[in-house]
Amino acid sequence: MEEMLSILETYLPLAGAGLPDPTLTLVSLTERTLGLGNRRGTERVAGFAIISLKGGRLDAVARFALWGATPDEVDILTSELQQRLLADRTELWNQGFLMLRQQDTGVAEHISSLGAWRKTTDVKVLYEFHDRDLDGAESLIARIPIHVDPEERNSPVRETTTVRDEIVRWDNHQAETLRVAGSSRAPWALSGLAALAYRPAAFSGAQVTLARLDLDNPAAPTAYPDLPSFLAAVTDPGHPERHGQVVFADLETFLAAFTPAGDPIPLGDWDEDGVEDEYRPGLIRFDHPLRLSGPREQLRITYDDAALGAPAVVYLRAGARRLG
């Protein structure tokens, strides 16, 4: 509401000498819903769908009260205000005013105690405001275990299937390898990598290996000295390297290869120090798509330990789409 009023207040004229200040007040105000539950969608940060887009609508009648030394003067001020509002319809739409309609205008009224004339004009507005929210989230969903236990609850012989996207989470409990494999039905094209990471100060971590592998090739992957040469080889449009890797000395070096992709995201308190953790988003964009033609071709990111050696969290995601 304050934002809506602050925009409309810019249309108030300057006060005349010895006259009261013009004012803006609300005659009525009703909140309307926007979308489903005031949700507009989800914003992706570095490829992670993490921020909820919310908002709402305000159905209101705003009253402008203007002052003049004579009836003609206050009439002119009122007319000029109405014309400015009409002329700025497009700009006001861009600021959230979906509707702005002149409603009622009073007659000039003489206020003898002030020796001035007052006139009011009412404007009906429908204003849409937007907001961004984490919905109280403390982590992201990296995998969903599904248990099939038809005969006995929590049976030790129950079957478990894990549903996952091209995303993994590394923390001080586990650091499983991110594997993205091709498909026999249609090749995959990878456009880049995304990371969302929280690390305590001075934690460098263990070695990280980024590899593009041909599982039918028994030889050791070709070693590349740095990320640019590795990416140039494995994404070469004509003759891509299908069995190569680049090794980063530690997690800190690996994450430093990502380009910052926005402001830090507050997300939970994993290290339980009473301070909300700030996750830094980053991206590695491929100049050309990395194509995986079959299930025996994989992209892998491997951490050289079973878990991170500190209360840290790293989410990794591959930007993948199926071709054809």
Image (cartoon, grey):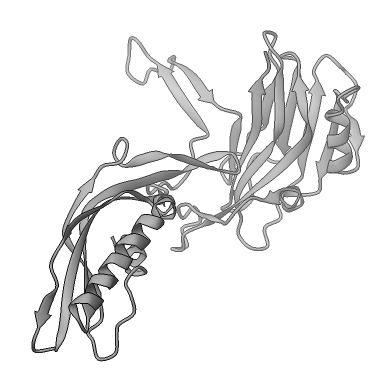
Q: Quadrant of residue 207?
A: top right
Q: Is residue 200 visible?
A: yes
Q: Looking at the image, which residue is at 40% across and 50% down?
A: 93
Q: Residue placed farthest to the front in the image?
A: 72
Left or right: 275, with 208 as reference point: left
User: Quick one: quadrant of the C terminus?
Assistant: top right
User: Quick one: quadrant of the N terminus?
Assistant: bottom left
Q: Is residue 71 above or below residue 283?
A: below
Q: Can you give x and y, in whole percent of width and height, for residue 241 in the image?
A: 88, 25
Q: Looking at the image, which residue is at 18% across and 77% down?
A: 71
Q: Residue placed farthest to the left in the image?
A: 112
Q: Can you give x and y, in whole percent of width and height, for residue 68 in the image?
A: 23, 80
Q: Is residue 216 above or below residue 133?
A: above
Q: Is residue 279 above or below residue 241?
A: below
Left or right: 37, with 27 as reference point: right
Q: Can you give x and y, in whole percent of width and height, for residue 133 in the image?
A: 40, 50
Q: Is residue 304 visible?
A: no
Left or right: 198, with 25 as reference point: right
**In-front residue for pair 323/18:** 18
Q: Can you give x and y, in whole percent of width and height, for residue 161 in the image?
A: 49, 19
**In-front residue for pair 197/6:** 6
Q: How many marks?
A: 0
Q: Looking at the image, which residue is at 86% across and 25% down?
A: 237
Q: Looking at the image, which residue is at 77% across and 51% down?
A: 253
Q: Residue placed farthest to the bottom in the image?
A: 18
